[in-house]
Amino acid sequence: MNWSILGTGRIAERFATQLPGSEQGRLVVIGSRTPDRIPAWGDNTPMATYASAVSDTEVEAVYIGLPNGLHLEWTLRALAAGKHVLCEKPLAQHPKEVEQMFAAAKKHERLLVEAFMYRCQPAVDEALTLIREGAIGELKTMRGAFSFEHALLPHDPRWEADLGGGALFDVGCYPVHLMNAIMDAEPLRVESSLDVSSRGVDTSGAALLYYPGKVAGVVTFGMEIGGDRSFKVCGTRGSISFTDPWLHGDEFQWEHEGAVETLVRPSLKGLSALEADAFEAAVRGHVPTWISAEESLRSARTLEAIRKAAR
């Protein structure tokens, strides 16, 4: 599968450098605002404008690693150009935009998937299966976090409200997404608090999500605060927990019948290579997408509810 990548930031770099480890992925062109500036990881790949990278006739799929505020425009343009699209999370800033994106994918008969790469990990997939099969009994509580300590540069798009910046969209969306997946539902009610900076973006926050069946989920997230990437779900007969399912989800702990079992499911590929393989297989019709359109819509609605509750 021939790919173009839109963006030259850290996430685009990760996808580009791991793509050679996939089964079929080949990078054809990199789209940039400044195509005359080749990133260090470009490895002699041709550079182009965003528009040219989307319209390139050799390209079959477009990976969109742009700031959140640009996802809607370039997803729609890529789909209209006849390309399949793997777009970074969150797909868009509002649920109606996500609906518009999937409507365009249906119109142009192309695949659109939200790039939550953590869900491609074998350990995460197995944990979800165990939970759904009742391995920890009736679900009661969930607790998820994603925050990071390293400082962001002043011009980082995560500081820009117009570009969809902020901690909720950057990292808080991960535990929200996994809780919705576990419950196969979105919360009935949301309580939340956001610490908003003078630049108009949330730097940290917390949310309490009330799901059907009286299951409660607690989510915390933040930028430039103490790092925490843990996740735990508890039921009447045990629990399943990850130290970091988002970036290093090779293993998890399964507590049941008074014992704790560590299940290790390593992958020989990087997360982006796993994701590229999953996307290619879905495009070819071999398997369903690992994240459905409904899941992405649930996530968008839940993020919107968290923002509204904080206001």
Image (tube, helix red, strand yellow):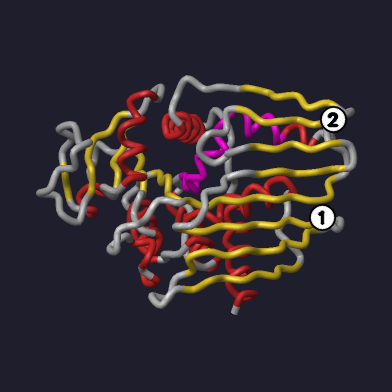
Locate residue 77: give its quadrant. Answer: bottom left
Q: Position of residue 131 (x, y in %)?
A: 77, 37
> Is residue 226 depicted above or below 202 in this figure?
above
Viewer-nearest of discs 2 and 1: 2
Tag 1 secondary structure: strand
Does label 2 or label 1 sit earlier along the sequence?
1
Q: Residue furthest top?
A: 268
Locate residue 231: give its quadrant. Answer: top right
Q: Which mark is residue 101?
A: none
> Is residue 267 depicted above or below 4 in this figure?
above
Tag 2 secondary structure: strand
Q: Nearer the viewer, residue 127 or 2?
A: 127
Q: Quadrant of the C terminus?
A: bottom right
Q: Position of residue 277 (x, y in %)?
A: 46, 29
Locate residue 234: give its quadrant. Answer: top right
Amino acid residing under circle 2: His
Q: Determine the CA span between mark 2 and mark 1.
A: 19 Å
Residue at 53% x, 71% y is 195
Magenta part of the chain: 111-128
Residue at 49% x, 69% y is 202
- Residue 204 located left or right of residue 214: left
- Residue 281 located left or right of residue 70: right
Amino acid residing under circle 1: Val
Q: Position of residue 291 (x, y in %)?
A: 58, 43
Q: Main secondary structure of the magenta part?
A: helix
For residue 227: magenta? no
Q: Position of residue 61 (x, y in %)?
A: 36, 40
Instruction: Name the residue tied to disc 2.
Output: 256
Q: Which mark is residue 215?
A: 1
> Is residue 47 depicted above or below 209 in this figure?
above
- Residue 208 located left or right of residue 50: right
